[in-house]
Image (cartoon, rainbow, N blue to C red):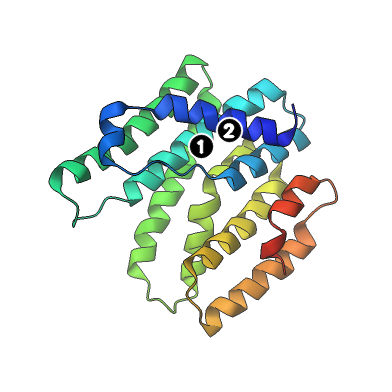
Amino acid sequence: MDMQQQIEQVKTRIQRAIAHSYVDRYIQPRIIDEDRISFALSMLRSAQVEENIALDHVFAMMLIQLALDTHDEVDEQQMMQQRQLTVLAGDLYSGLYYEFLARRHDISLIRRFAEAIKEINIQKIRLQQLSSDDLERFHCIAVIESALLRQLAKHVHAHEWGELAYYLFALKRVHRDGAKSTALMDYIDHCQRKLQDLLPFHVHEEVKERFSHLLV
């Protein structure tokens, strides 16, 4: 199965798992990040993880990512019912990931992802305490955006991919946010220089092509 087929398989599997007619009436359709799927699959392929196991790992990781992203959407301005359902949807996706890995008795990966969730939540709190021009914000963002991928990299002993994820997904986030400042432009330049050094020759061409717009 080629990379795009694997990505589509993971996306379809996620969409089927999270489908809920009542919840879907009140919250926006979930956006599934193909970049994360592609990166994780390439990493696991590089680590010579069996395809079916790799697909399971990425499926579980993306359920957690959806849970975290959904909880981030909770807004005090929402109607009470919508706000409650957004929280419950995030809890549902989190429960689905845990149930899936528990049924597979994959305790090691549950621990890895639990560590990532703890890292993310700590940095989200820290981020709220920092001013918009504080350079520490960029580290917080990098941890938030890469923690799941970095813990997955540790799980399969692909540590260089974890460092790559730290800079690559930080860069993607700050590009997406769009705000411009001297500190931000310096940080983008720093990430790009680190990535030029880190991108190993064995990173698959699909990854290089997918993220090429961030490296120029």
Local SS, label 2: helix
Q: How many numbered marks appear?
A: 2
In the depicted view, which residue is nearer to us: 59 or 25?
Answer: 25
Label 1, on which residue?
Answer: 62
Amino acid on which disc 2 is placed: Val
Tell me the residue at 49%/43% (across/down). Answer: 116
- Classify 181 as above or below 99: below
Mark drawn on residue 149: none
The residue sitting at the right extreme is 201
Label 2, label 1: how far apart the Cα atoms are? 6 Å
Label 2, on which residue?
Answer: 58
- Residue 98 lies left or right of residue 156; in this view the side is left
Tell me the residue at 51%/63% (across/down). Answer: 176
- Classify 50 as above or below 24: above
Q: Is residue 114 visible?
A: no
Circle 2/circle 1 CB separation < 8 Å: yes
Amino acid on which disc 1 is placed: Met
Q: Tell me the quarter of the image containing the N terminus.
A: top right
The location of residue 192, given as percent across then percent down, is: 70, 68
